[in-house]
């Protein structure tokens, strides 16, 4: 196969691939937060998927609020997390470059993200 045809095929494949950016899981500064938490975001041209993982040492009710850089609330939920079991909170939202997750339980709060 001629070199030009290979290069053209590669260009077409790259041009047709969806643009997806994934942010690595981020650990939160959790000095006073009683649960281990993580944040992962994946974006394409249209949506951002936010996944927040929570593992607590005892059964707790955890509130998660997702905000955009300007403090606009995009999603909010409360859920009971069983002791030692990872619970995932997953949100599919309009594309956003600056997403934060604020978690609350038993009067303690922590934040994850780029805000």
Image (spheres, grey):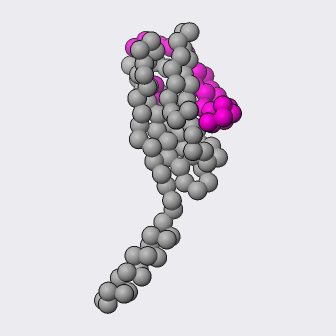
User: Which residue, as the protein is rendered here, is positioned at the far right?
Assistant: 72
Rendering coords of residue 93 (x, y %): 62, 43
How far across and down, in percent of the image, does residue 99 sit? Answer: 57, 37
Q: Residue at x 44, y 73 (%)?
A: 13
Q: Residue at x 66, y 31 (%)?
A: 71
Say if the magenta span includes residue 64: yes
Does residue 10 lie above or below 38 as drawn? below
- Is any part of residue 62 visible from this angle? no
Majority secondary structure of magenta residues? strand
Please identify the residue farthest to the top as the structure is shown.
Answer: 107
**Viewer-side residue, 76 vs 3:** 3
Classify the position of the C terminus by image quarter. Answer: top right
Quadrant of the image containing the N terminus:
bottom left
Of 83 and 19, which appears nearest the observer? 19
Residue 2 image offset from top left, x and y in percent: 32, 90
The residue drawn where x is 41% and y is 37% is: 25
- What segment carries the magenta color? 53-80
Q: Is residue 114 above or below residue 63?
A: below
Query: In the image, residue 69 lies at what x, y percent?
Result: 61, 36
Q: Residue at x 41, y 14 (%)?
A: 31
User: Does the magenta run of residues contain 68?
Assistant: yes
In the picture, measured across the screen, residue 108 lies left or right of residue 69, that is: left
């Amino acid at each position: 196969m001629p070199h030009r045809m290979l290069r053209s095929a590669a260009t077409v494949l790259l041009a047709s691939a969806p643009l997806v950016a994934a942010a690595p899981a981020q650990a939160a500064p959790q000095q006073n937060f009683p649960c281990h938490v993580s944040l992962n975001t994946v974006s394409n041209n249209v949506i951002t998927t936010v996944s927040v993982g929570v593992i607590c040492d005892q059964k707790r009710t955890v509130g998660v609020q997702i905000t955009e850089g300007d403090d606009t609330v995009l999603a909010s939920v409360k859920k009971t997390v069983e002791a030692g079991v990872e619970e995932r909170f997953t949100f599919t939202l309009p594309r956003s470059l600056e997403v934060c997750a604020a978690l609350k339980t038993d009067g303690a709060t922590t934040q994850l993200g780029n805000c």
